[in-house]
Every structure is written in C-alpha cells, then in structure tokens.
Image (cartoon, rainbow, N blue to C red):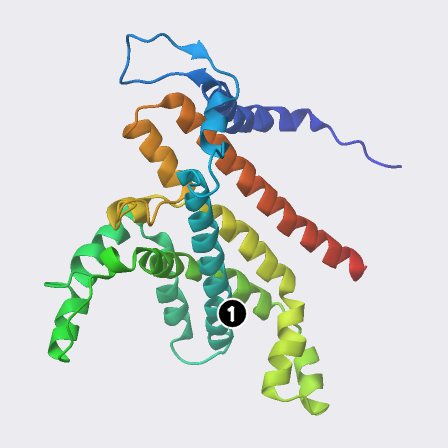
Amino acid sequence: MKRKTDYRYLVPAIVVVAIMTQVPFLMTLIFSTLRWNLSRPDIPRTFSGLENYLYFLRIENFSELPAFYGILWQTILITGVTLLLCSFLGFLLALLFDHNVPGINIARTLILGPFFVMSTASGVIWKTTIFNTTFGWYGVISKALGFTPVDMISYHPVATIIALFTWQWMPFFVLVLLAGLQGVDQDLLDCTRIDGVNWIQGIFRIKLPLIMNHLRVAIMLGLVFVIKEFGLILTTTAGGPGTRSYTLPYYVYMQIFSANNVGRAGALATMTVFLTLVLVNLLYRSIERRNAKYL
C-alpha cells in the first residue's frame, strides 16, 4: 500500500520562504513601474509603466549605446572569466588535495579561508595592504626588484576584480569538486591502472566525466554568488575609473544611493534577477540533459 504524504507540514516553511524572498521581489517589481526620485520629494510618485526599463534598453543612436549595455557586457565578462578560472584552478587544487598525505586536513582547511571572509573586509585588506603601490606588499616587492609598481586598481580594474572574485570563490569550487573526487570508486581507479591507463588519461577520461555534475552544480551556484557580488567592488575600485568596473548589482546601488532613483533601481534589479535566472536555468537544463542521456 502506497503511503500518502501529508504536505501540510511544509506549509510553514513555504510561507516563511515566500515572505522572505518573494515579497521583496514583488515590491521591487512594483517600484520598477514608478517614477520616484528621493531627491525630489516635491514631485509625487506616479505610475510610469515600462518607462524605467526603456530608459536602460532604449537605443537611439547605435554609435552611442546606453551605459547599460556596456555594464551588461562587463558583468558577463567578469562573471564568465571568474567562473572559468574558478573551475580550472578549483579542479587542479581538488586533484592536489585528493591524496592522503601528512597535513592534508590542515591544507584543506586553510584553502577554504577566503570563502568565509566578508567580501567588504577582504576588499579593504587587498586594497590597502597588498595592492597599495607605496605601503602594500605589491609595491614594496616591486620596488625591491627594481620595478615601478603600476596601480592595478586604477589601470586594470576589471582584471583586479576578476582576480579578487576568483580568490574568494575558488575555495567553494574546491570544496564541491573535492567531494566529487572522493566519491569516485577506488576499485574503478585500480582497474583502470591495471588496464594501462596513465595518470593524465585517468584524470580527463575517468575522474573528470564522473564529477561533471559536481562541476556543473558548482558553476551554477557560483554564477549566483559571483553575479550578485558587490562588496569587493565597493571597497576596491568603487566602480571606477568612471564605470569601467561597474557590474549590474553595483549599477543598482548607484541608481538608488547616488541618483536616488527608486524606479530605475527597481527596474535594473529586476533585469539583473531575470538575467541570473535565465543563465541558471540554462545550466540546470544542461545537467538534466546529461542525466537523461545516461539513464
């Protein structure tokens, strides 16, 4: 006899999750349809429909695209390169840590350190004690070697942001991929060695295909983490010079706290959520197709 599941026990959890996640999002959708500027309290709030969305998306002259499209490209570039670096370096480190050698548990604990540091705190530390061309490690070491240190934050802001994002989120990839590697059947690996499979072949033809779902899940969650990252940009480059290191979340911040425009900030936040959901859905569908292929 098939047991019936009483889903009433899930109602409190569903209600709490809905209140904590969907209500703020619905409020953002409502705000995105309003003409509401906090710096002009004399102007009443009025319904503007899709005008706030069209402000960012409207193209009047193809030779001068709105700033939104450049910032959208920067967001995709920073997120994509960060995920590629995290996947590649995370896989290499996971392979390195997938061995029982003395001190391996300490090494695994230390590699997770950046993942648990607040992004704003790590941004301040990197900017003041490492990237500073006068007092930071980078400046001191460069001068000791006879080089003139280049201000990386001013001249290479996107590369700096990518490096810091990779430093912070790579431990998460290591954690997920290491869990996948440790779940690989050791008897299978022993059989492949007996059959003459060398170390490189064992990595790319045996281990990597077996943990591909772990890698896709890490990329999917990492996408959500990286695309919403804000604190590192605020405390290091502050989006500059100009808008060269803006991302969509930082653009939302500037719209609400600098331009004081609630409606445009809501529209931009909604488009950011939509972009994230589309990318996550594409990754999820790729996982589903791969699982169906091997069933």
- 73 vs 2, nearest the viewer: 73
Q: Quadrant of the N terminus?
A: top right
**Could you tell me if residue 202 is visible in this image?**
yes
Judged from this view, the residue extending furthest toward the right is 1
Q: Is residue 236 above or below residue 59?
A: below
Q: Position of residue 269 (x, y in %)?
A: 45, 32
Q: Position of residue 119 (x, y in %)?
A: 32, 49
Residue 148 appears left or right of 186: left
Q: Residue at x 66, y 81 (%)?
A: 189
Q: Quadrant of the C terminus?
A: bottom right
Q: Position of residue 20 (x, y in %)?
A: 49, 27
Q: Residue at x 35, y 23 (%)?
A: 261
**Could you tell me if residue 228 is visible in this image?**
no
Q: Residue at x 25, y 50 (%)?
A: 236
Q: Position of residue 78 (x, y in %)?
A: 43, 54
Q: Residue at x 44, y 48 (%)?
A: 75
Amino acid type of the residue tagged 1 in the rendering: Phe
Task: Determine the image quadrant of residue 145.
Answer: bottom left
Label tally: 1
- 37 vs 171, nearest the viewer: 37
Q: Is residue 144 above or below residue 229?
A: below
Crowd band around label 1 with a 10 angstrom C-alpha radius: few (<14), some (14–19), many (20+): many
- 287 vs 85, nearest the viewer: 85
Residue 133 appears left or right of 19: left
SS category of the residue bearing label 1: helix
Residue 260 appears left or right of 65: left
Q: Is residue 23 above or below residue 126?
A: above
- 154 vs 175, nearest the viewer: 154
Q: Which residue in the structure is indicated by mark 1?
A: 91
